[in-house]
Structures are given as structure tokens and as C-alpha cells.
């Protein structure tokens, strides 16, 4: 899986480092002073992840949790995201990570306790309000959880913070580690879903829809709260039918009443990221879709189209019995 | 033709001998050509390689379809074997953020170009974090290629391992004929450059004339069109060029209509919205005014423009404003559409 594992000197004897290395006994390791010394120092082409992927193990420095931008989650409550990993094993052709770090290598941060302390501070700042903490802003929260082993720590942390909520965002079906843990009402696993045809064309290397739906079903049956993201929606011919079918499929695995919330967002790119998409996936149908460059620099569908897509999907969800209060539309206007 | 670039004549010796290259008069020595290719001796070091490449491409880029850098390199990895030729995937530069990738996508070997010879193990270990192979000029050559948008590829034969100091230069010189021969063989095996010209499938008759900006627009639209309609016959049928050719239009107007037609094919949703908005300015036009909507369909703000010259226009303008279906416009911009 990895070409080389770079380890920060101060992380060499960390228990998580040792358990990680046990899983890759034949991979060459190299000790470095700090991750920044190598990672992102030169621009490593994104698609080299297909053949040469390195891993970095170390401690996250600087800000450990960040306030989330508007339209990140359910409105009216404070949202934060925390970073315990950079980059992802998947290869979604619209993913902004292809232009974010200048390297596709995977970085795993091990100082979860420090992240946890920051989470506690933020959650206790407004104990009367529900603060949300999201994992998976720069990675997939579950895809490699069997290697990184941090889930038990966060479950234990949020058991002590019942007023706060934790969201693990994922496109994976890797729920083995989650199923080992007793479910908590305030720890929600959210799955990003798209119609199967779109998954095949855009969500490269991700599990097929069926596998994700089965994972959702298993987690739900085990009592874990589930949320859904229909984001990014990419418009193509037959869009309504495809989403109608997707919602039907979803509801057959997870009752509408069991969906904690469902976010709906339409594909959009900063200009630089779109440039990377063109470079990496020149044959993607994104380049023949109705995207335009807005005055604010974002590449996205024109406003009437965005609004139409969002309202159509909302309508379909309501028809399927999803509660209106649980649907939030990611509108960036 | 290919431009073959070597740092030193020793590395190029087999090519010069076998290829019948003749020296070309140029601003500096080291540029050669034969019937098929040009050959440049760019000297050692990133800076000098970049300068000579830029000068050569400035004069000859029109003739050159690809640049191939060939030469010796050092190995920082035990996996790279001595006296073996590697096709390079990505070239990094020491202390340089930018990297350049070969147009050939089949290799797994990367290389880093360094500013000075690497003599210490600690330096080699640091550089190995980025690439297993090391040279002195590829990054400068690739940087010049990017400037001129010319495809770049690179073949390197491993001559030594950094850290070896005793007589390395002498050994490399002694083995230069072998290295040059290995490079010659590897180059001969390299796949020829295939250029996919996105404009090749749409040939316009003399009834069309495109200005430079129209040409650029057509080129951009055409690649999107090819993605949407991968089958050429389908694509041409949807464009219906014969119908356009029959219209009483100037060649430039005809091209303009073609561009519009491609835009509509690519953006049927936007076409529909524009059609819904198209009728609305007409009452204003009768009053001598123009009513324009945001071209990007992003803002529902409208621009009304005109000059009032008489009472009749005032009456017509008031009537047009009264009839303006503002709710309909708001609905369109809020996505309440029948599509």
C-alpha cells in the first residue's frame, strides 16, 4: 500500500506508530524531524497516488480544531472540524484535495488527546448549546480506521460530552471498527451517497453504492445514528430518476425516520481546483456539463439550476418520508 | 521533430556518431541536427540547461514537437540498478516547489535535479525523500519545455551512487560510450509522440470565418462537445453544418451561430432558462429600451437602458414595466422552473 513510511522523530515510540508499523512490516521507514520537512515541500502530482503513495506519522501542530464555514451543517449551532489526517485513499474526480496539499501522500496525526482537549474546551465554552465536531474534512473518517485506531478514543471522549455531537464523514464501507464500539446518540456516522452510475464515473476507488448501503444498514441495526450527504450532486441527463431511485434504495436499507439529517449540495469548485480536475481527469463529464465561472471565482452551475436541483432533491426526499427539519440545503448564495 | 538534450558530448557520442548530426550555426556551440531530429548539448547544471533550452526553443520551437532529455544520473535508491536506463515520470528540483511530469505516463521512476554535486550521505538521504534518482539538469530543461508548452520526456542511465567520491568522474567518463549506447537503444524503443489534435474532427468550409477569439472559443467548446458526443457522426449530425451553410449570413455571423449552437448543445438547461427569459425584453424594445439579464444567470438584477425622447416612449415604458412579470423572473432565478 505504501512506498515508504516517514515518521517524525518524536513519534517514533508512540504506541499508535508501533501498531501502525506492525501492519506494514516490509515497508521501508524513514525518520524525519518534522512532516513539513518533506510533505508538500515539492509539488507531487496527485495521480501518483495510484502507484507511489507514502505515509507520514507525526503530531499535528498549530490549530487543532477550526470553526467550520457557513452552510457546513445544521444551521444555528456552532460547527467545528478537526484534522487528524490529510488526504484520502479514494479518488473522486471532483475532490478538492487534488489541489489542496500539493501532495497526495497520506498524513496521519497521532496526537488525538491534544485534539480531544481542544474539543472539550470548545464544547464547554457554550455548554447549554449543542456544538458539532466534524471529522473528515481533509480525509475519509472511516476508510483507514482499522489502521489508525482512533475511534475508541473519540467515542470515549464524546461519552463525556453529551451536549456535543461528533460526525464521522465517509464514503467507505469500512465499519468493522465502529461495530466494535457501543453506539452513542451523539456520535453520528454520515455517508456521502450518489447514484450508482455517478459513483462509477466519479467516485473512483470508492465502494459501490450497494456496499455503502449495506454498511449503513448494519450500523443502523447496531444502533449507531446515521446521517446522509447528497453532496456533491452532479447534474446529468436522467438526474431526477437517478436520485429518485437512490432515495428509494436508501430508504429500503434505512427507514426515513432513522435518518438523523440529510445534507444536499451541488457540485462547486474554486477555480484552481477545477484547473486540477481538468488536468487529472480530462475525460470527466464535468468538463461538458453546464458549469460556469461565477463572479466570486467559484465554478458551479448557474443559480437557477443550482436552486432547481436542490429543490428537486428536497421534494423527492419529502415524498419519501424524510422529515423536512432533517433536510438541509447547502446554499452558498 | 524531437529535440534530444544532453548535458555533455560524452553522453551524446553514440547519437552523434550513428545519427549523422551536423553542427548548426547558433548563438552558442552545441546545437546539431540531422534529417529527423535536433540535438542540443546544454551543459551541466540547472541554470545553464534552462538558459540554453530557452534560447533554442525561442528560435526553433515551431519545428520541435517533443523534447527528450537523455543522460547519466545517480541513484539514491538501492532499487535503481547501475547501467540501467529508466524512463522518468516526474522531475523535481532541489529547493524548487514546482515539478514537471513526462508526457509518457508509463514510468514509475522520479528524479530530482540538484544544484551541486552530492558528496555527503546526509545530503543524499535528504534528497531521497523526494525521488530515487538524481541529476544536474533535467528540471531546467523541463521548465523551459513548460514555458513553450512542448511535451517533455526523460531517459536516464544510472552511472553512480552519490556519496561515492573516489574517481567517480573518471569512471563515468570511461563508461560514457556504454552509457551513450544504452541511451541510444532506449530512445529507439521509446514510443513515438502521438498528438491528439482536438480540432481535427471539425472541419469548417470556406463559408465560415472565425476571428481569433472565435477560434479560441470554438477550440474550448469543441473539446467539451467531444466529451458529450464521443461519436463523431452523432456530433456532426447534432451541429447540422449544412443547414448553417444555407443561411443568408456572413461567414463570421455563421461561425457565431455555430458557437451559439454548440453552447446550446452543451448547456440545454441554460438554453431553456434563456428561452424563458427571452420574451421579457420585447415590450421594452418597442419603447426603445433594452432590458438585459445577468449573462451568467447568477443575479436576478436586470439592467434597463435607453433614452426617453418623447411622451409616447414614456407611455410605452410605463406599460412595459406594469406588464413585467417580476414574480416569474424571481421564480426562474430561484429555480422554480419547468424543465
Image (tube, coloured by chain):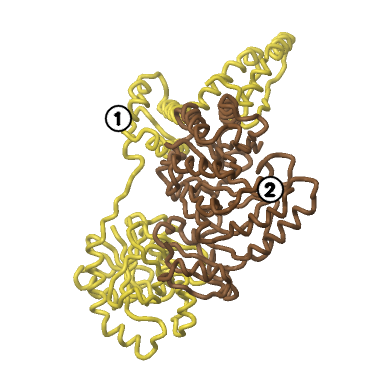
Q: In this view, does B141 lie above or below A280?
A: below
Instruction: Identify the chain drawn in brown.
Output: A
- Asked if residue B186 lies left or right of residue B316, the reply is left
In front: A272, or A72? A72
Q: Left or right? Give the position of A247 relative to A263.
A: left
- Where is residue A112? Give x, y as percent: 63, 62
Residue identifier under label 1: B233
Task: Indicate the chain coloured yellow by its letter.
Answer: B
Query: Percent x, y for residue A191?
Result: 54, 43
Residue at screen point 56% across, 67% down: A16
Q: Nearer the viewer, residue B281 or B326?
A: B326
Left or right: where does residue B7 sit relative to residue A241? left
In the rendered image, the vertical position of residue A189 relative to residue B1, given as above or below: above
Q: Please say whether residue A161 is visible from this viewpoint.
A: yes
Residue at position x 38%, y 75% in the image: B77
Name the quarter where the N terminus of chain A is drawn. bottom left
Q: Which mark is residue A165?
A: 2
- Within-10-Å neighbours for mark 2: few <14, some 14–19, many 20+: many
Looking at this view, is B71 or A80 the one in front? A80
* Residue B216 in view of the camera: no
Q: Which of the numbered marks, if any, corresponds to residue B212?
A: none
State the image coordinates of residue A46 (x, y, percent, origin top left). Answer: 46, 56
Q: Would you identify the image quadrant in which residue B252 lies?
A: top left
Q: Position of residue B269 (x, y in %)?
A: 51, 26
The residue depicted at 27 percent of the width and 77 percent of the height is B83
Residue reaching furthest to the bottom: B166
Amino acid at each position: 500500500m505504501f512506498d515508504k513510511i516517514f515518521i517524525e522523530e518524536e513519534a517514533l515510540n508512540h504506541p499508535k506508530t508501533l501498531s501502525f508499523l506492525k501492519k506494514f512490516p516490509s515497508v521501508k521507514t524513514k525518520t524525519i524531524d518534522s512532516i513539513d520537512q518533506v510533505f508538500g515541500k515539492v509539488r507531487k502530482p496527485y495521480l501518483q497516488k495510484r502507484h507511489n503513495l507514502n505515509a507520514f506519522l507525526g503530531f499535528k501542530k498549530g490549530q487543532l480544531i477550526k470553526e467550520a464555514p457557513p452552510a457546513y451543517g445544521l444551521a444555528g449551532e456552532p460547527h467545528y472540524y478537526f484534522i487528524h489526517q490529510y488526504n484520502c485513499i479514494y479518488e473522486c474526480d471532483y475532490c478538492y484535495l487534488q489541489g489542496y496539499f500539493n501532495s497526495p501522500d497520506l498524513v496521519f496525526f497521532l496526537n488525538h488527546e491534544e485534539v480531544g482537549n481542544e474539543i472539550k474546551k470548545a464544547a464547554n465554552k457554550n455548554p447549554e448549546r449543542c456544538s458539532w465536531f466534524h471529522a473528515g474534512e481533509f480525509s475519509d473518517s472511516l476508510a483507514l480506521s482499522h489502521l489508525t485506531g482512533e475511534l475508541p478514543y473519540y467515542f470515549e471522549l464524546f461519552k463525556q460530552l453529551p451536549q456535543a455531537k461528533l460526525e464521522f464523514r465517509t464514503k467507505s464501507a469500512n465499519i468493522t471498527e465502529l461495530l466494535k464500539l457501543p453506539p452513542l446518540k451523539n456520535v453520528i456516522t454520515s455517508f456521502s451517497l450518489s447514484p450508482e452510475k455517478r459513483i462509477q464515473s466519479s467516485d473512483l476507488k470508492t465502494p459501490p453504492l450497494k456496499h455503502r448501503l449495506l454498511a449503513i444498514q448494519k450500523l443502523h441495526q447496531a444502533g449507531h445514528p446515521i446521517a446522509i450527504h447528497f453532496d456533491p450532486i452532479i447534474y446529468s441527463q436522467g438526474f431526477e430518476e437517478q436520485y429518485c431511485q437512490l432515495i428509494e434504495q436508501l430508504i429500503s436499507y434505512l427507514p426515513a425516520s432513522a435518518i438523523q439529517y440529510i445534507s444536499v449540495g451541488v457540485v462547486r469548485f474554486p477555480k484552481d481546483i477545477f484547473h486540477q480536475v481538468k488536468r487529472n481527469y480530462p475525460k470527466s463529464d464535468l468538463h461538458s456539463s453546464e458549469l460556469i465561472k461565477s463572479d466570486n471565482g467559484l465554478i458551479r452551475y448557474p443559480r437557477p439550476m443550482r436552486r432547481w436541483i436542490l429543490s428537486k432533491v428536497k421534494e423527492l426526499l419529502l415524498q419519501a418520508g424524510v422529515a423536512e427539519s432533517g433536510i438541509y440545503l447547502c446554499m452558498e448564495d | 521533430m524531437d529535440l534530444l538534450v544532453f548535458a555533455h558530448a560524452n553522453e551524446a557520442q553514440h547519437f552523434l556518431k550513428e545519427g549523422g548530426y551536423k553542427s548548426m550555426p547558433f548563438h552558442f556551440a552545441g546545437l546539431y541536427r540531422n534529417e529527423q531530429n535536433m540535438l542540443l548539448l546544454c551543459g551541466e547544471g540547472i541554470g545553464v540547461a534552462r538558459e540554453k533550452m530557452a534560447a533554442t526553443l525561442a528560435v526553433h520551437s515551431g519545428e520541435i514537437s517533443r523534447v527528450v532529455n537523455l543522460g547519466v544520473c545517480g541513484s539514491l535508491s538501492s532499487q535503481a540498478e547501475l547501467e540501467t536506463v529508466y524512463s522518468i515520470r516526474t522531475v523535481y528540483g532541489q529547493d524548487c516547489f514546482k515539478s514537471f511530469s513526462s508526457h509518457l505516463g508509463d514510468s514509475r521512476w522520479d528524479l530530482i535535479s540538484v544544484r551541486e554535486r552530492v558528496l555527503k550521505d546526509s545530503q543524499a538521504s535528504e534528497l531521497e525523500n523526494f525521488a530515487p534518482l538524481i541529476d544536474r539538469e533535467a528540471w531546467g530543461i523541463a521548465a523551459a519545455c513548460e514555458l513553450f508548452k512542448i511535451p517533455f520526456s526523460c531517459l536516464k542511465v544510472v552511472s553512480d551512487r552519490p556519496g561515492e567520491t573516489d574517481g567517480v568522474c573518471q569512471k563515468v567518463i570511461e563508461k560514457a560510450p556504454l552509457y551513450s549506447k544504452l541511451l541510444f537503444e532506449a530512445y529507439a524503443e521509446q514510443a513515438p509522440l502521438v498528438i491528439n489534435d482536438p480540432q481535427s474532427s471539425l472541419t469548417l468550409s470556406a463559408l465560415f470565418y472565425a476571428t481569433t477569439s472565435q477560434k479560441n472559443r470554438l477550440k474550448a467548446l469543441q473539446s467539451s462537445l467531444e466529451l458529450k458526443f464521443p461519436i463523431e457522426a452523432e456530433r456532426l449530425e447534432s451541429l447540422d453544418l449544412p443547414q448553417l451553410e444555407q443561411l443568408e449570413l456572413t461567414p463570421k455571423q455563421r461561425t457565431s451561430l455555430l458557437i451559439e449552437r454548440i453552447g446550446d448543445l452543451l448547456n440545454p438547461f441554460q438554453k431553456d432558462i434563456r428561452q424563458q427569459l427571452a420574451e421579457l425584453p420585447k415590450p421594452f424594445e418597442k419603447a426603445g429600451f433594452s432590458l438585459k439579464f445577468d449573462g451568467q444567470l447568477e443575479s436576478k438584477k436586470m439592467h434597463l437602458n435607453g433614452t426617453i425622447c418623447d411622451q409616447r416612449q414614456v407611455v410605452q415604458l410605463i406599460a412595459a414595466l406594469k406588464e413585467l412579470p417580476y414574480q416569474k423572473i424571481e421564480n426562474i432565478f430561484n429555480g422554480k422552473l419547468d424543465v
